Amino acid sequence: MSNDKILAQLTRIADSLDRLAPPATTPVDLDSGDAFVWEAESNHLRVIPKVNHVDMSILHGIDRVRDILYDNTLRFAKGLPANNALLWGARGMGKSSLVKASHAQVNEEMDNPLALIEIHREDIPSLPILMQQLQTTKRRSVIFCDDLSFDSDDSTYKSLKTVLDGGLEGRPANVIFYATSNRRHMMRRDMIENERSTAIMPSEAVEEKVSLSDRFGLWLGFHSCSQDEYLEMIRRYLKHYNIPIGEEEFVKEAIEWTRTRGSRSGRVAWQYIQDIAGRTGTVSE
């Protein structure tokens, strides 16, 4: 075989190896912003110029869990011991809003000490790579996964368990993990019961799946709100954004609004506010 043919073959092999190699890791620059989204395909953090969040002062009906999460976040920002947090419960009751509001409030009070990093549910397997990058930085980071849940045949939860507090390295001291979920154990009840009924050792099979929640030191429950709490949420929004509408009129409209949606929640209250703000020409963002 001629030298030219050997060179051409080696070039093709090198090109193939380049295609198989993982994407290059972009150095982490947490000073470029306060909020980021983890891009798993390219292993880099994309800056979010403006975080979509509400002010802590207008979050109503979740006062106890609001204070607990804020205190935990503040301690973490100060370099004190703090826990990973799982915010679970009713849909639309402000779980993700509270995470973003706590981050914004702490950064306002302490001159931006924390980075907020969102990781999507489908990118959880790449979490160890993100952790490795963050432990080389000095800035403290809150990693946030919204609507975290797992199917019965999904094994990616094992990598999350290891990252939270297991493995030889453990969780970096400058990183904390917050997640929201509609279910406390992040699996549907019928999946857990199926594991129990089909496994040779039912208790061990179920324990393996639900023990993920034990890695979160804080379990903060969110429950459906009463009509009075729902109306108080709207009152606070109306006052905060100076929306011109009378008490009797908004109460009648707000109750009718819930009937068309079949539920009461913070999300439904905010959707009503968006509607009334649009009708009155008021800016609510």
Image: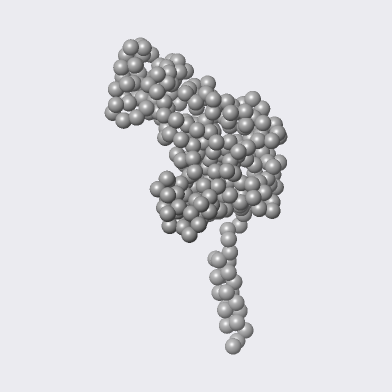
In this rendered view, identify the residue nearer to me: 217 or 98: 217
Which residue is at 55% across, 70% downward?
Answer: 16
In this rendered view, identify the residue nearer to me: 19 or 262: 262
Count of picture labels: 0
Q: In this view, does 203 lie above or below 179?
A: below
**Can residue 9 be seen here?**
yes
Residue 254 position in % (x across, y down)? 34, 21
Which residue is at 45% across, 53% downward?
Answer: 195
Residue 247 position in % (x across, y down)? 36, 12
**Can residue 104 be seen here?**
no
Quarter of the image that includes the N terminus: bottom right
Dividing the picture into quadrants, the one containing residue 76 is top right
Quarter of the image that includes the C terminus: top left
Which residue is at 64% across, 42% downward?
Answer: 175
Question: Is 266 situated left or right of 9 in this image?
Answer: left
In this rendered view, identify the residue nearer to me: 32 or 3: 32
Quick one: which residue is furthest to the bottom in this view? 1
Residue 58 position in % (x across, y down)? 49, 21
Which residue is at 28% across, 28% downward?
Answer: 260
Question: Is 260 situated left or right of 169 in this image?
Answer: left
Q: Is residue 5 above or below residue 257?
A: below
In this rendered view, identify the residue nearer to me: 199 or 210: 199
Residue 282 position in % (x across, y down)? 40, 20
Question: Is 194 situated left or right of 168 in this image?
Answer: left
The type of colouring in the image is one colour
